[in-house]
Image (tube, helix red, strand yellow):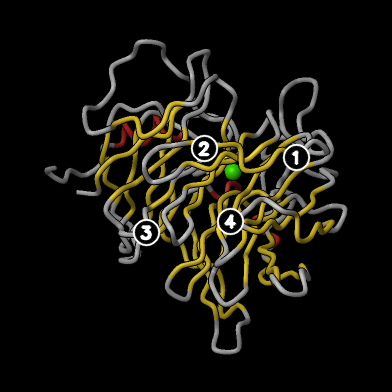
Amino acid sequence: MKIRMISSAVLAAALLAGPAMAQTPPVAGAPESTAAKAFYTFPDAAPTENICQQPNGDIYVTMMDTKKVVKISPAGVASDFVQVPEALSVIGVACGDTEIAISIFTKNFRTPAGGPVFTDTGTHLKFYDLAGKLKADVAAPADVAINGFDYAGNGTYYGGDSNSGTVFKIDSRTHAITPWFRDASFNPTPPNQLFGLNGVRAKNGWVYFSGIAKNGLFKVKIGANGAAEGGAVPVQMGLRIDDFDVADDGSAYFPNGRILFKVAPNGLVTPIADPIQGGPSALVSNDNKTVYWPTRGGNAAQRVMQVSIP
Ligand SMILES: [Ca+2]
């Protein structure tokens, strides 16, 4: 595909795409880029939230309101990996080496008016073996709402707190959850800004996060001793990004509104599929050839879409 610079009009439309946990107004029967193909179609319209891929190629998708995790094989065969009856919302999913970790909210983050509030979500992190057997269930601190969740290798996960500007580090052996990076300038500032951090991915020695309060994508360096080194480095400013993924070359991919975007390491924004049915997260495949994303919204059955990386 010919690369084009994003127009300010497109950027403005994307900025208006709405709140970052449920962002995409679906349009029934709307046109769809021929670059986007359905990899899997769910049996119903239940909202999806996050996505990850195991080294063996299996894809895991959290179903936010139906409180389960669906596993989809590389051949497109799906099964319920786990049901989480105590959850009110199943949010993040991280594919560990030999386990699957999820974040759940056991209390309601939705206000009667519909807006999110993350001050008391009753977040738990749950760790399962690949057969779906529960290995550990860890309560996060009471005021922490882990949204984006990712595995960085070497037994380390990172999670983004939607109730603050803090990235937490989680040890897969001890299951200790500790603040890794804090920046209060990313805190939610209600009533206007309800989100702290949203998506989180670890890649190439950096932890990336979407900082909703600043409408941008940022990265923090993992120092030689494992501690956060320096401040948050802006990667892209101007897009309100939910969950995303980062390819080996440092390019980030995510649906936003009705466009699938690429952000190059130098910040250049390129739409790579337009229009699409958007969704809350993205996955760069293990071989870096494909971007997958689960759709959300509307009455039609949700799908996991795929686009070849140009
Ligand atoms: Ca999210």
Residue position marked by numbered label 1 in the rendering: 84
* Horizontal and vertical percent position of residue 304: 42, 34
Residue position marked by numbered label 3 in the rendering: 286
Q: Could you give the CA–CA distance between mark 3 and mark 4, rounded to whole angstroms? A: 14 Å
Asked whether disc 3 touches disc 4, contact meaning CB atoms under 8 Å apart, the reply is no
Q: Which residue is drawn at 48% across and 15% down?
A: 300
Q: Identify the amino acid type marked 3.
A: Asn
Which residue is nearer to you in this view: 231 or 33? 33
Residue position marked by numbered label 2 in the rendering: 280
Horizontally, is 88 left or right of 101 in the view?
right
Q: Identify the amino acid type marked 1.
A: Val
> Mark 2 or mark 3, which has the lower sequence index?
2
- Secondary structure under badge 1? loop
> Disc 2 beta carbon < 8 A from ligand 1?
yes
Which residue is nearer to you in this view: 16 or 77? 77
Question: On the image, which quarter does residue 191 sit in?
Answer: top right
* Quarter of the figure with the N terminus: top left
Q: Could you give the CA–CA distance between mark 3 and mark 1, rounded to whole angstroms? A: 27 Å
> Mark 2 or mark 1, which has the lower sequence index?
1
Asked whether disc 2 touches disc 4, contact meaning CB atoms under 8 Å apart, the reply is no
| Local crowd size for mark 3, using a 10 Å CA cut-off: few (<14), some (14–19), many (≥20) | some
Q: Identify the amino acid type marked 2.
A: Pro
Q: Quadrant of ligand 1?
A: top right
* Horizontal and vertical percent position of residue 308: 24, 44
> Mark 3 or mark 1, which has the lower sequence index?
1
- Say which mark, if any, is on residue 94: 4
Horizontally, is 4 left or right of 260 in the view?
left
* Horizontal and vertical percent position of residue 294: 47, 35
Q: Which residue is drawn at 77% across and 42% down?
A: 105
* Horizontal and vertical percent position of residue 181: 66, 70
